[in-house]
Image (cartoon, rainbow, N blue to C red):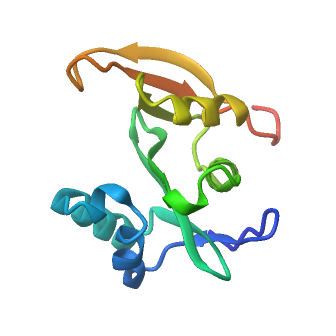
Amino acid sequence: MDVVKPCGFPVRRADESEADALAGIDPIAIEGDDERRASIRRWCRQGVAVVAEDASGLLGYCVVEYTFFEQGFVTMLMVAPTARGGGVGHRLLDAVAASCTTPKLFTSTNVSNQPMQRLLRRAGWSPVGLVHGLDEGDPELFYLCPPRPGPPPA
């Protein structure tokens, strides 16, 4: 992914050497979750994470993988607590939607995660399904990215 500079700060592919810095803005990794730290290292190594940054440093990251029925899936969207509410999440979603290599891009969030649901609605994503049983008592709500501009299907 080339650098995309939306509204004042760039969004670019994360470098493998930035895994610790990304863990430093991720509250779950900060709390000592070794699995999250390992996932961040893997995502950076595989080149599937993008970061948003400004002069103060990293603001957030987003991960897209292509293992969900061979479609793009936003596996993780994390905005540093100090950068929340400033459009970072929306800009990361826009950047990964623009670079998605499949016709469809999905994501999911727990029903209890109201901030993520508000962000997805503001970004134009549509709810498309609900799965029970992943997290006990907190169903997973799936969303679909709005259609991206491009040539009409052949």
Left or right side of 154 for 15: left
Query: Which residue is rendered at x = 26% and y = 58% of the image?
Result: 36
**Total marks in image:** 0
Left or right side of 95 for 131: left
Q: In which quarter of the image is the C terminus?
A: top right
Left or right side of 143 for 46: left
Query: Which residue is rendered at x = 60% and y = 60% of the image?
Result: 83
Query: Which residue is rendered at x = 41% and y = 15% of the image?
Result: 130
Q: Is residue 19 above or below residue 115?
A: below
Q: Is residue 52 above or below residue 33?
A: below
Displayed quadrant of residue 68: top left
Where does the image place residue 78, in percent across and percent down from the top left? 47, 54
Q: Is residue 154 above or below residue 54?
A: above
Where does the image place residue 148, in percent across and percent down from the top left? 75, 39
Question: Closer to the camera, 101 or 109?
Answer: 109
Where does the image place residue 26, in percent across and percent down from the top left? 39, 61
Q: In which quarter of the image is the N terminus?
A: bottom right
Question: Closer to the camera, 60 or 50?
Answer: 60
Query: Which residue is rendered at x = 43% and y = 67% of the image?
Result: 25
Residue that lies at the very extreme toward the front in this rendered image: 82
Where does the image place residue 128, in percent across and percent down from the top left? 53, 17
Displayed quadrant of residue 113: top left
Displayed quadrant of residue 117: top right
